[in-house]
Amino acid sequence: MRDMANTIDWETVHFERDIYPHLSRWAHSSGQGLFLRGPRQVGKTSILQKLGNEKCFSGTLYIDLRNPETKGWFDKINGLSNWRERFLRFAQETNAPIPANAEAGLLVILDEIQESPRMFNSIRDIVRERTVKLAVTGSYLGITEFENRYSEQGQAYFMPVGDVEVFSMGSLSYKEAVRAAKTAVPELPKDEIFQRYFNYGGYPEVVKKWLQTKEWDIVRIPLDNIYKMLEAEARRYILEPLSQQTWDRMFIGVAGQIVKKTDILQSAEFSEEITYKLRVPPVNESHRESKINMMNWMLSCDLLWFGEVTHSLSNLADINKKNYFVSDQGLLYLALVNSLALSSVPLGKGDMTGALAENFVALGIREYRTPLSYAKKSSEEIDFLLRAAENAKPDAIEVKFTGGKTASSDKALKAGSIRRIVKIQREKGESNGKVVIFPMMDMDDFGSLYGWDYGHNRYTKPELNLFD
């Protein structure tokens, strides 16, 4: 297996992503712009550059707005009749490699759009001018919520609602990782794919490493680099020092909430510990008292996401709080590993494994539905609820990495409040009419339990037939 993996030119490997057909449809038929959001290092730029090779484009101009000189160039450029002329002037002055005939069918990629209020506020004008096809990416979009207060000019970001199609892109889902593994290393056993993804997650560079090797020290290098890069880039926006231990504790706090189903953002003690003042220009010192909760910041950067929690099995719409999850399995795993070096570890090994397992399953369910959990007081908890059809009794989905009891689900089943129990666990087991044992490593095909085909993913649009 190792020999075959070593024959692949990993520098040229590009994984097939579920989002690509939808981006291709946009490229060929949409008159709107494209807004592709998601964390750093998930492959947004690469997939847009691949999109630039579609036959409907004659050329691609990539513009990195993280570059201060590039941002400054667009802040100052004026006097040209339209945006196409500005882009072509930029390409000429910077020797950007675009074809001579690219004026017709030019794809312009504005990378990290949040770095430039001028370009963010120009999206609508560029799209409506229709002289180029525009795609923009954004990673740290939380800054757009504060720019009006904190920029030296007090210039607000203008959200171009109606002029762009918005897509969210994350690291590889488990299903995408299984497909990548079967393509690159076909003989890699499914259980091994599961073990590697469960620990190391789906960042493209990390997946490449765990497909190449089983050695943790080697796989950890790109994961460590991404983790530290995210931590370092967060410091750009806040005033107080942000230590790695604090960064770790935010993820560990999420892990604790996954296990206990307690909304940690509502905890005054925890919230205060991870609240920071934003970095502001000197002219805006009067706004220094304003603060940002770093977990809300992480939500805006798509590093965290949330499902919902109900406290009623008879009325699932009775939502009383949120349940937070980490967008990439590897980030949570690394934070928990780092926590072992802390003087006081807030979670035991069993809780850590439970949090990782539940986060993994939540990511899988997210491909089909927004994850819904059940919690009533402290004595009744069900990991997830899922209905096979509208108005049907829900299934209780219990995540048991190493087995265990399902007291709350057993009680609900006996009372007739649920249809059945679905136990997602590490080991295979025998199912019966009321308890279904579903192997965790087959989470890529979890939808088959509910009639969804294997190709269904989070980008699949539901349909409503009003004439049935």
Image (spheres, rainbow, N blue to C red):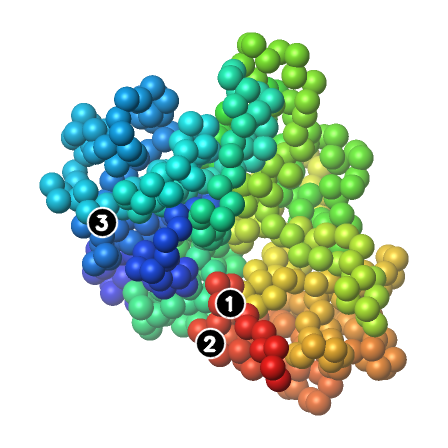
Q: Residues within 10 Å of mark 2 (few under 14, many from 20)?
A: few
Q: Quadrant of the C terminus?
A: bottom right
Question: Which label lies toward us, 1 or 3?
Answer: 3
Q: Quadrant of the N terminus?
A: bottom left
User: Which disc, if any, is residue 461?
Assistant: 1
Q: Amino acid at mark 3?
A: Gly
Is residue 36 in view? no
User: Which disc, if any, is residue 366?
Assistant: none
Does 366 sit above or below residue 47?
below
Question: Which label lies toward us, 3 or 2?
Answer: 3
Q: Quadrant of residue 136?
A: top left
Q: Residues within 10 Å of mark 1 (few under 14, many from 20)?
A: few
What residue is shown at x 26% (from left), y 26% (from top)? 80
Task: Name the residue tied to disc 2.
Answer: 454
Q: Amino acid at mark 1?
A: Lys
Q: CA–CA distance between discs 2 and 1?
A: 15 Å
User: Which mark sits nearer the N-terminus, 2 or 1?
Assistant: 2
User: Which mark sits nearer the N-terminus, 3 or 2?
Assistant: 3
Q: Amino acid at mark 2?
A: Tyr
- Count of labels in the image: 3
Task: Name the residue tied to disc 3.
Answer: 105
